Amino acid sequence: MKSSGQSTKFPAPIYRDTVLAPVFADAKRYFLEPLLEIEYAHTLMLAKQGIMPESEAAACLRALDALNPDEIRGAAYDGTFEDLFFYLEKKLAALCGEEVAGKMHTARSRNDIDLTMYRMVLRSRLLGLFNAQMGLRQVLIDLAWRHRAALMPAYTHNQPAQPTTLGHYLMAYIEILERDAERIRDAYMRVNRNPLGACAITTTGFPIDRSFTTKLLGFDALQVNSYGAIAAVDYLVESCGVLSTAMLSLGRFVQDLLLWSTVEFGYLRLSDAYVQISSIMPQKRNPVPLEHVRVLASRALVGAQGVPGILHNTPFADMNDAEDGLQPLVYTAFDDAERSVRLLAGVLAEAEFNTARMAQVADGNFLPVTELADTLVRETGMSFHAAHGIVSAAVRELHGVYDADAMADIVLRDLNGNGLPREKLLRALSAENFVAVRKIPGGPALEALEPEILRAKESSSADERWLEEKRQRLAEARKMLQDEQQRLIGRVDGR
């Protein structure tokens, strides 16, 4: 196809419709609030450092106050400006004059503004996920304590394996949530570093105070090297890795819950508030919310896993691959994850476990026979290999039909009457006894499990305090920003 030789003016309609308009819509949704905070903080810093006269800084701050966020969010992209930053610049110039408004852009670039916004939004998403997981942890800890002695079958390879307790099972996932919390805290520490002042990529010759904007914007530290502040994406990839790990674990847990909700298992019954009926089958109680938990977790995981793929083999420099086109994918993944976790917490808070059915299964299907082999080792001194052989032969002889009395009789026969009491063998075939003797750290016996659940409660309280401290720090930074603004305007007004 030959070129027409004609050129459209910027922005070309196709570029406007496929890139600039969608990016503007995303920016209004995600970045308006952090961008305004950055405008305030940078202007206050310029005035503090004498780079901008306080009178002019006050005029800019008043112009920022005069902006109508709802009007901005409702603005349509018409191509007369490139993005949200230039749209705001145009609005501010109309309010306080182009010359004065233009001074706000001294010693900064859209590059460091963008990276600062991205980190501000991402830190809020990390805290949101952390908060949602705290809610789920508290529900599970309560359930684990309530059911700490409730017998249930443990499974390996999707087959019933050994008796355990529901509390023991739930504590396994609670520990995963604790590790998720550790990973989120670590990621937050690296995300919440201030890149503002890196400018395009090499800082500036103006004597700016990066520590001042760090405080005003609620960052915990400075992202020091200016090149890395702009070019590095590990803060983003790490956060997506944390999210992927959390969602993978959540999905595996929910898969069990869905299986337990089947009539064939009958271990879990959701409350009426969380089941949906069939349009044709009157008897159906579909655990649809658990399916929504699963699909939301899967969406979050796939979205988060897409980020490293998008960024792989991109240049170590400023480039659009990590910017406005990518960031909403990250935020959507975190939003889906938070919805998934909150929904699961709500479902389990009202669910009922059929512990009688679980205990019945725990005492059947040959589940306790490992302890029978252990008992032979303890009582006779034979090797575990030999004991395993005797018990395995007894299992095979019963042809898949478990009967504790028959098992004891077969084992006594094969022991050639060595005097081992039959009652001791029958006790070894009790699921309750199986759990009770497994009292070493990490086991399901109450002596081992109860301290772990209590420890989990303390861990949850500590993480709640961490979350509150971070939220309080951000609230204090917003208050500091407002106070600094009022002080500057007061000085200019002679108050």
Image (cartoon, helix red, strand yellow):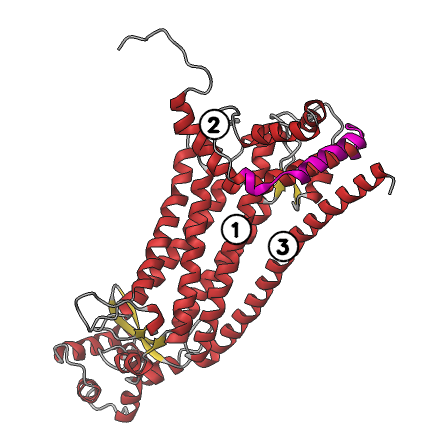
Q: Position of residue 427 (x, y in %)?
A: 31, 88
Q: With 233 as the anchor, is 418 left or right in this view?
A: left
- Asked if the residue under mark 1 is in contact with the one under mark 3, i.e. CB atoms within 8 Å, the reply is no
Upstream in sequence: badge 3 or badge 1: 1
In the image, which disc is placed on residue 304?
none
Q: Horizontal and vertical percent for residue 308?
A: 42, 38
53, above or below 420, in the image: above
Residue 156 falls left or right of residue 11:
left
Q: What residue span does the magenta drawing correspond to?
A: 48-72
Which residue is depicted at the point 42% across and 14% down?
Answer: 8
Say above or below: 389 vs 117.
below
- Taking depth in this image into account, of 98 and 255 the one nearest to the observer is 98
Give the crowd class for mark 1: few <14, some 14-19, many >=20 residues within 10 Å: many
Marks 2/3: CA distance? 39 Å
Q: Which residue is mark 2?
A: 78
Q: Which mark is residue 126?
A: 1
**In percent of the image, x 50 and y 72: which residue is there?**
452
Instruction: Give the answer, above or below, for where 382 lies relative to 115.
Output: below
